Image (spheres, rainbow, N blue to C red):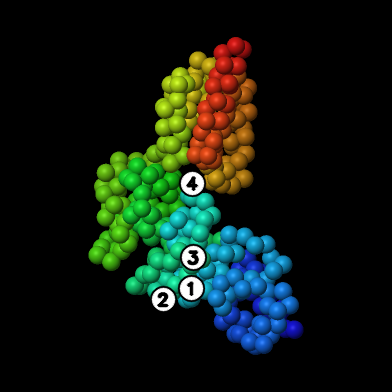
Amino acid sequence: MKPLRTCRGIAAGQYGAISRRQALAQGMTARRIHGCLASGRWRVELPATYALVDFPRTWWQRAKAAELWAGPRAAVAHSSAAFVWGFDGFAPGPVEVATMRRLRSTELILHQVSSWEESELATRAGICVTAIERTIADLAGTMDSARLQALVDEALRRRLTSEPRISAYLTRANGRGPHGVANLREVLAARKTGAPTDSLLEIMLDRLLRSSHLPEAVRQHPVIHEGRFIAEVDFAWPAYQVAVEAQSRTHHADKTSFERDLARMNALTEAGWIVLYATWDDVHRRPRQSLMLFERTLRRAWLR
C-alpha cells in the first residue's frame, strides 16, 4: 500500500491530480493503476493523467492536470494564466496551456511555443504558469489598447512587475516573442510615467455611469469632513453624499488592507456618506440592476 499512499500525498499537493508518469515513479504498476480506476478511487482527467475522486473537482484541479498532461516545461497560459494571477475580468474558463510539444486536445486550448526562457515561467498557487511579463505579452495580441493599458496598470499597481522588468522582457523577446509584443511596446511607449492609473473595472464602471441618465459622478473625489480628510472615493455624487467603489477580487489582498478599508468605511459612514460597491459581475452581468440601485440610493439620499 506504500506506493498508493505516496501517490495520494503527491496528489494532495496538486489539487488531487497525478500523472501516470508520477504514479509509476512511485512504484505503482500499470495493473495497480488500472485497479484504482476500475474501483472508482481514481478517474481519468486527461490522457495518462488522473484525479483522486475524493478531492474536489475544481478548475484548479483541471488546470494542474492540464499542466501535468502537457509535459515538462508546459505552463498554464493566456487567459488562464491571467486568472491564476488574479487579474480583474478573467474567469475560470477552458484551460489554456502553452507547451513545446506537438499535442492535440478537444478539451483544452493549446498554444505551441518553440522555446521558453527560464524567466518566462513561474509557479503560483502550485501551478506552473507563464510569468507576469509573458502573460501580459500573450494577452496583448488579443485586446485593444485601452484594456491592455488597464492590464499593465493593474500589474504595476499590485507590484506584480515593474516598467523596467516589462521593458527588459520586451528587449529579450525582440523577434522571438508572442504576437502581442509589438502592441505591448506601443502601450508602454504611450503610457505616462508615474503611478498606475485606473483598474479595468474602474474604467468599465466609468463607461457604465456615463452611458446612464444618472447625474454625472465625480471621479476620485476627496471626502472632507469637519476640515479633516476622510478618504478618496472612486465615484461620488457630493451633493447627495453617495459614493460608489469599484471592488475587485484583489481589493482585500491581506489582513492589513482589509482592516484599513473597514476603518475607512466606518469613517465615511460617520461623516454621513452612503457607500455602494460594484464588482466585475455587477458591471458586466448586471449593469441595469446596478444602475437602478444607484438611482434608488440617490433618491433616498436626496430626501434625507
Whole-number angstrom distance, CA of label 4 to CA of label 2: 30 Å
Whole-number angstrom distance, CA of label 4 to CA of label 3: 22 Å
Q: Regarding mark 2 in the picture, which secondary structure is present there? A: loop
Dot in front, 4 or 3:
3
Q: Regarding mark 4 in the picture, which secondary structure is present there? A: loop
Mark 1: give few (<14), some (14-19) or many (20+) Cα within 10 Å.
many
In the image shown, does 237 or 35 lie closer to the viewer?
A: 35
Residue with the mark numbered 3? 108
Label located before the other in sequence (1 or 2): 1
Q: Regarding mark 1 in the picture, which secondary structure is present there? A: helix
The reply to whether the C-beta atoms of the residues labelled 1 and 2 are less than 8 Å apart is yes
Whole-number angstrom distance, CA of label 3 to CA of label 2: 14 Å
Q: Regarding mark 3 in the picture, which secondary structure is present there? A: loop
Is residue 141 toward the left or the right of residue 283 in the image? left
Label located before the other in sequence (4 or 2): 4
Label located before the other in sequence (4 or 1): 1
Q: At label 2, which amino acid type do we have?
A: Arg
Dot in front, 1 or 3:
3
Q: Which mark is residue 195?
A: none
Residue with the mark numbered 2? 101
Q: Is residue 257 visible?
A: yes
Residue with the mark numbered 4? 88
Label located before the other in sequence (1 or 3): 1
In what quadrant of the picture does the N terminus appear?
Answer: bottom right
Residue with the mark numbered 1? 70
